[in-house]
Image (spheres, rainbow, N blue to C red):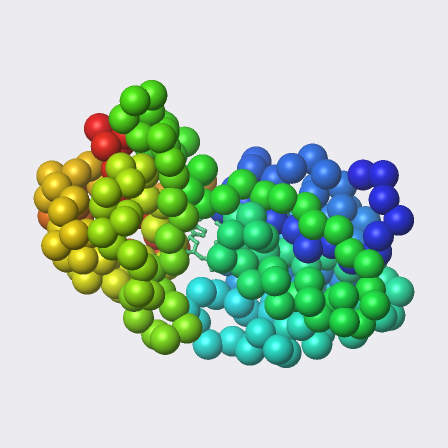
Amino acid sequence: METSARIFLAGAGPGSADLLTVGLARLLARADIVLHDSLIGPDVLALARPGAELVDVGKRCGGKAHPQAEICRLLVEAGQSGALVLRLKGGDPMIFGRATEEMEALRAAGLDFEVVPGITAAAAAAAALAASLTKRDVSRAVHFLAAHGSEGGLPPHDWAALAAAGGTLAVYMGVRTLPMLAEKLMAAGMAPDMPAAAVENVSLPAQRIWRATLRTLPAILAGAAPSGPVLLLIGAALA
Ligand SMILES: C[S@@+](CC[C@H](N)C(=O)[O-])C[C@H]1O[C@@H](n2cnc3c(N)ncnc32)[C@H](O)[C@@H]1O
């Protein structure tokens, strides 16, 4: 990577080290300090330079860990030390990754940084399902939805617009709120037999897949009680 930056906000993909970019693997081999989310697996961290300082900043979604302000403070402090700093996030840093707060903190401190994209969970889940997120004349849009907001529950999305748009919904952080989300979509006119799928721990050995419909997926997932991160996909393209 041709750059003078010393601070990188990078996406490590959904878990498997096979899904890292070559650029990120090179950065891992050089970084002095790696500030990583809890979801970053041991296979990825094993690529860090021996002797690098690995700090779990514990940002597991929905979990209690370092508050975001504390992560920003640690990142700025690491950056100001002059070390080569890698802030490693799951998936892509620009999708539900709180990258905005961290970029603002770095800018406010006058620190240069670069962003390294990663494979987001929705793309990896589509690959695991061998199902395209888009389909000619059937699904012309993909909506990335957070199903858990700062309010602590399902955020107030425009359900009627989503149901009418006819695209694929890629739902992050949706296990707990899936029953309500499914109800909202069906009440807004989405067909109960709309194909829906869930992928837990995508790309990892513990990956599990459930294929169902909008109506049946909530009960299936409740019965399976997944403990790992789960990505939900809903839409006609999955048929
Ligand atoms: C805070 S969001 C981070 C998303 C991440 N930046 C991305 O681009 O994938 C965490 C959510 O991403 C999804 N996710 C992340 N890794 C996953 C995985 N390995 N398998 C399934 N879903 C995953 C889950 O919905 C999880 O609740």
**Residue at the image position 12 percent from the left and 41 percent from the top:** 191
Q: Quadrant of the N terminus?
A: top right
- Image quadrant holding the C terminus, namely top left
Q: In this view, does 4 lie to the left or right of 222?
A: right
Q: Position of residue 211 (x, y in %)?
A: 21, 38
The image shows residue 59 at horizontal and vertical percentages of 53, 67
Question: Residue 117 or 105: which is nearer the viewer?
Answer: 105
Relative to residue 65, is residue 132 depicted above or below?
above
Q: Is residue 131 left or right of residue 192?
A: right
Looking at the picture, does residue 232 appear above or below residue 127? Answer: below
Q: Which picture quadrant has residue 210?
A: top left
The quadrant in which residue 21 appears is top right
Residue 222 as seen in the image, left or right of residue 119: left
**x, y percentage for residue 56?**
61, 67
Question: Percent x, y for residue 219?
Answer: 13, 54
Question: On screen, 166 above or below 172?
Answer: above
Outermost residue toward the top in this view: 136
User: Residue drawn at (69%, 62%), measured in percent from left and top?
Assistant: 103
Say whether residue 20 is left or right of residue 135.
Answer: right
Q: Which image quadrant for residue 155?
A: bottom left
Residue 49 in view, yes or no = no
Front position in the image: 98 or 61: 98
Task: Determine if residue 239 is in view.
Answer: yes
